[in-house]
Image (spheres, helix red, strand yellow):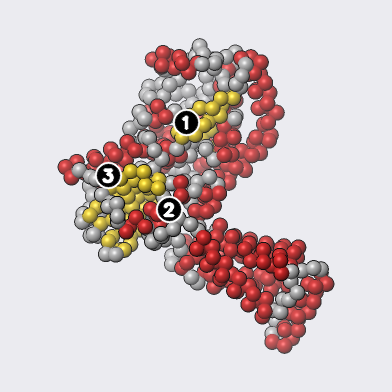
Amino acid sequence: MNFLSLIKYVVRFTFLQVIITSVFIWYFDAFLINSQEQKFNLYLNLVEDRDRFLQFFPLKFITVNLILGIIVFLFLLVLYSTKFYTYVNELDYSYDRSYLDEFFYLYLLWNSFLFSSFLVFRFSGLSRGYLLIFTFIVPVILLLFRNSEILSSLLGRPVINENFISFDLEKNSAFRNLRIMAFRKEIDSFTTNKESYDNYIINKIDKVNKNRNVNLVVVNLNRKTKISKKLETYLIKINKKVLLLSANKIKFSSKFLYREEVIDETNFIYFNNDIQYGSKFILKRILDIFLSFFALILLSPFILLIYIYILFTDGNPSIIKQNRVGLHGKQFKMFKFRTMKKNSHLLRSELKKKSKINGPLFTIKNDPRLIKGGKVLRKYSLDELPQLINVFKGDMSLVGPRPLFDDDTKTFDKNYMRRLNVMPGMTGLLQINDRNTNDFQVWYKYDVEYIENWSLLLDVKILLKTIPSLLSKKTQGE
């Protein structure tokens, strides 16, 4: 185990120790004992055992709470000595998309240890009904924090809702029962053309990606020992999970991080360049939920005022919903204050030739469709405040590339499709640097820069610069 992995284990162990011990002590005092007198009697039992067996142990450290913490600590040591809990292998076989088996394993392990500990430390007279309930609490906590899948599901990104496409993978292949595929839905399967192998795979991925939500690409290389530099580079840069399998060992031209395993005499290469996945996604969602919740509360009077203004200026609806494309091509309804006259979308095709942006996007100067005051709302991005609801729901993030229409997405080339592999946002590098640019290539530059340099720290920096940029003439909306 390398030093970085050791640090992660220690942090994770400490985190679980603190969480479970805190819950254990609180629940013990609130429900498992009837009074502090009962807890004092348990303490006297501990003192008696100390005098008989551990006289060297300082009496001042003997407390019921300390013993509860020791029980948790010893249990976690046992648990962390097993690969079951510390390592979730995506390339293990799994014939069931349920977490029930994992829960029962943890349930039996925890409760056998718990009741044995209560017997050893002579913890008697506890409430049996509440104790029965408690037997389920710790296994649930352990399951939640075993890996990022369940927490991601609770935060809006369940792995069972993810999709994959495959190339040259037989329908009856046993490898389809690997966890990485068993927990996901296959939306398309292709047989490659040997004459245009690279272009076929690249074009198919690009085509499906423009219409469906794709999270994983599986390619059966059969007996190939290498793939072309072109295909290799493409698979690395699409920012998705990629699984390659071959009867022979695979060699690569580029240097990148991947995991290699041999299963049933077949070589598997797995790499995950989905940059907002697992713990990174969880941390980003927690930040989004926290900030969007408080922003909605603080700005609710202002939001209500704008709602009433639009209502009296141009009637209902004050807030509209637009179909936009989100993470990995998933479509969602984006909320926005209506700044245009009713049915203005019918003029979109007619006015598109006046678009001031070079490329597939559509925006024009002095748009005749705007309602009275609509230009001011757009200038300071006030029309986008309802998108805080989208952020709280998980459709969007506070920071990321702007979510675009499906028609716009279909015009992107295969390189720019990478923008769909990060959550769309209310603000981003473009908004704080060159919001009024007329050049689509500038959009492209900032979006790709964000993708290739994404981190939570970058998100925080963009958020801190957003309000000053709204007040700057260079980046104010038009």
How much space separates mark 1 and mark 3, taking CA atoms?
Answer: 28 Å
* Numbered disc in front, either 1 or 3: 3
How crowded is the residue under tag 1: few (<14 C-alpha within 10 Å), some, or many (20+)?
many
How crowded is the residue under tag 3: few (<14 C-alpha within 10 Å), some, or many (20+)?
some
Q: Position of residue 436 (x, y in %)?
A: 48, 23
Q: Amino acid at mark 3?
A: Phe
Q: Is residue 129 above or below residue 385?
A: below
Q: Which residue is mark 1?
A: 324
Q: Looking at the image, which residue sits at the far top? A: 368
Pick whichever, 100 or 236, lies toward us: 100
Q: For mark 3, give the secondary structure.
A: strand
Name the quadrant containing residue 90.
Answer: bottom left
* Numbered disc in front, either 2 or 1: 2
Name the residue rendered at 49%, 26% in the picture.
435
Left or right: 149 in relation to 203: right
How much space separates mark 2 and mark 1, taking CA atoms?
Answer: 27 Å
How much space separates mark 3 and mark 2, taking CA atoms?
Answer: 20 Å
How crowded is the residue under tag 2: few (<14 C-alpha within 10 Å), some, or many (20+)?
many
Can you see residue 84?
yes
Q: Position of residue 292 (x, y in %)?
A: 61, 38
**Mark count:** 3
Q: Earlier in the sequence, mark 3 or mark 2?
A: 2
Q: Is residue 461 above or below residue 48?
A: above
Q: Which residue is mark 3?
A: 190
